[in-house]
Image: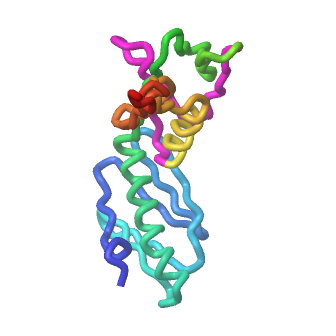
Amino acid sequence: MSRIGSKAVALPSGVTVSVASGTVTVKGARGELMYALLPEVSVAVEDASVKVSRKNDSKDARARHGLTRALLANMVKGVSDGYEKKIEIIGVGYKVTLKGPRLLQLHLGFSHPIDFAIPVGIEIAQDERNKNILMIRGIDKQLVGLVTAQIRELRPPEPYKGKGIRYIDEVVRRKAGKAAGKTAA
């Protein structure tokens, strides 16, 4: 039996879950998320919790049992609390500006600025003390992670000087330059 799949997902106050025609809808204070159920699993709403069960013991059903429960738990947390990831832009002359509600302009050492379109459901804000720290927020955990990874991919941190875009808690291993390889003769 799946250890994760067999646990019930507790519903905080203000969050409702409804199941209709193979689709689970989770509504909360921050918004609404939908998920199309896989054919191997079923979802039942009981009082203040959601139970996920599988229809048989096939390999696919066992794999998707825990997956469905984890996705539902992420949806419940997203509509009640939301998700946030922080990234930092490090480099001389590197800067970021918000141009309107749906456009992010990044100057990352290239000959031109990069315009990044912010998708619907994502909110990006700059830290008030350090303008090179971005906070990406949203209710969909997968979308928040995807957008953060796409921004980081524009200029990943390089190992020699540490310049680039990195997660706040990311540790970049630094390499010694050419001079470190020479030995005294």
The boundaries of the magenta stretch are: 112-141
Does 90 appear above or below 92?
below
Q: Residue at x 67, y 21 (%)?
A: 115
Q: Residue at x 48, y 17 (%)?
A: 91
**Apparent side of residue 70 relative to residue 105 in the rendered image (left or right):** left
Does 4 appear above or below 57?
above
Residue 126's quadrant in the figure? top left
Q: x, y percentage for residue 113?
A: 67, 15
Q: Residue furthest front?
A: 185
For the question of whether residue 45 can be seen, the reply is yes
**Apparent side of residue 114 relative to residue 67 in the rendered image (left or right):** right
Residue 72 on the magenta segment: no
Total count of labels: 0
Q: In this rendered view, identify the residue nearer to me: 135 or 77.
A: 135
Q: In this rendered view, identify the residue nearer to me: 149 or 33.
A: 149
**Apparent side of residue 125 relative to residue 118 in the rendered image (left or right):** left
